[in-house]
Image: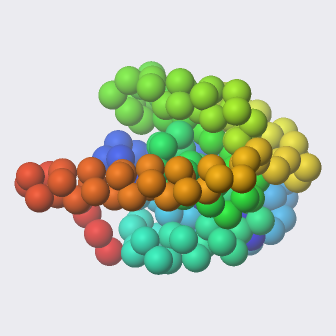
Amino acid sequence: MIFVTVGTHTQPFNRLLQKVDELIKERKIREKVIAQIGYSTYEPKNYNYFTFTSEEKILELNKKARLIITHAGAGSIITALQFRKPIIVVPRLKKFNEHVNDHQVQIAKAFEKEKKVLACYDIEDLEKVIIKAKKFRPRIEKGKQKIFSIINNFLEELEYSRSSLGCKRRNN
């Protein structure tokens, strides 16, 4: 199973969801796909999806997945790394109105440089990167697992602080 997640950022990430749909339609992806689509407006036609769910469900999907495809949000990447699965990171880009700037490119490059993820900077290369992911395993040194947990907890606390300050988040 492939798990696709776009996180909780409020701008849509339709470009990724549409490409995955296209690859399934063309039978380039032949396995089950489940996606968390967040605030995206594109509704996949060839795979199951949901907008938001509990943290427990996200962890379960990461654990069950053979491959995880995610935006370049640090929280989503760190969550996926806990399960030592191949991870493809597709940065959201400002030019497509997917984010306010291109900081996700820098995040993707940093994790890619450490050989923790495979990055896909051009959505037309997603099929090639999926094929490459069959032989890829993220490099996670012993002892690093704890730091992922610490960072993940920090990001959760930050999210909680934002919500207590009146920042709204849509949940299903």
The residue sitting at 35% across, 52% down in the picture is 154
Residue placed most toward the observer, 159 or 146: 146
Whether residue 40 is visible to the viewer of this picture, yes or no, is: no
Horizontal relation, residue 12 to residue 47: left or right: left
Horizontal relation, residue 172 to residue 167: left or right: right
The residue sitting at 22% across, 59% down in the picture is 160
Residue placed most toward the observer, 124 or 101: 101
Q: In the image, residue 146 lies at what x, y percent?
A: 55, 57
Q: Residue furthest right?
A: 135
Question: In which quadrant is the N terminus drawn?
Answer: bottom right
The residue sitting at 38% across, 33% down in the picture is 99
Q: In the image, residue 167 lies at what x, y percent?
A: 14, 52
Q: How is the image coloured?
A: rainbow
Q: Is residue 42 above or below residue 96?
A: below
Horizontal relation, residue 149 to residue 46: left or right: left
Residue placed most toward the observer, 76 or 26: 76
The residue sitting at 40% across, 75% down in the picture is 54
